[in-house]
Amino acid sequence: MSSPPPAGSPPVEFVYVGDVMCSWCWGFAPTLHQLEEGFGAPVTVVNGGLRPGPYARVLDDEMAGYLSHHWEQVSEASGQPVDPSFLDRRDGWKFDSEFPAIAVTAMRERHPASALRFFTDIQQGFFAQRVDVTDPDEYRPLLDGYPVDPGPFLEYLLSPEAQRAAWKDFEEARSLGISSFPALLIRTNGTVATVTKGWQPYERIEEPLRAYLADRGYEILDGQVCSISEPC
């Protein structure tokens, strides 16, 4: 485990650009939580916008086969549980990552410290528990234990304001130069550097981060990703 930055050092913040419905982001979840614990620094979630709204695609045989292959890869590499039976549905369901992004953005606005955990809980529902995270009616149970009033919160998620906030996140991701997920950045004293573009286990990024925080030098890592052009 890494030690937190010493007292008096510049503030450290990790910026995580991911998408709830990105399978490699689900694989990256344990790394993020180890990062929070190991470095004692906050992780700010920015929704990447894998395939939102007008970019959504109906789940057909071709897409289901593509996604199932990636889900299996993610589970093997990361140990994260997946239930690919969700991908058997053929009722016109669309792979649309807009609404989960709206939910995460709204949680971050109201309770920033809960955003990453909420992001991960929604992921777990989708990948491991067959929860349709594109359906607003599925979110009330997901809010159990969170410091929000479910009624007003769920009502807000259906508002144009909430939708605009999510799309602002997508724009921020592009402004950071990120179009594939997961991506992890580190911000120290106004300087932003890339930690990894793509999935990595915690063990692969811990020592480079130690070095970066020690002498400001860092080697960018590349790993498996879901991209806007090829969601997985």
Image (cartoon, grey):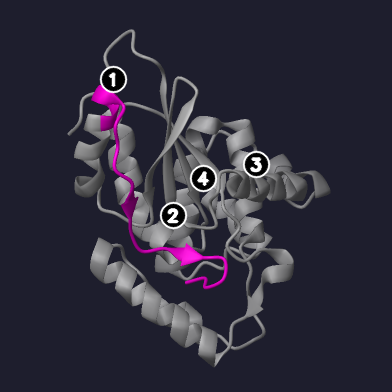
| Magenta-span inclusion, residue 180 | no
| Magenta-span inclusion, residue 231 | yes
Please state which of the two labelled residues, at mark 3 or mark 2, is closer to the viewer: 2
Q: Is residue 117 above or below residue 36?
A: below
Q: Position of residue 223 (x, y in %)?
A: 33, 59
Please state which of the two labelled residues, at mark 1 or mark 4, is closer to the viewer: 1
Q: Residue at x 31, y 73 (%)?
A: 73
SS at circle 2: loop
Q: Residue 38 lies in what quarter of the image?
A: top left
Seen from the viewer's position, the closer of residues 11 and 112 is: 11
Provide the residue designation for mark 4. 144
Picture disc at residue 5: 1
Determine the CA span between mark 3 and mark 2.
20 Å
Picture disc at residue 182: 2
Q: Please give the range of residues in magenta.
A: 212-232
Determine the CA span between mark 2 and mark 1.
24 Å
State yes or no: discs 4 and 2 in contact (Cβ < 8 Å): no
Residue type, numbered disc 1: Pro
Determine the CA span between mark 4 and mark 3.
15 Å
1 or 4: tag closer to the N-terminus: 1
Picture disc at residue 18: none
Provide the residue designation for mark 3. 106
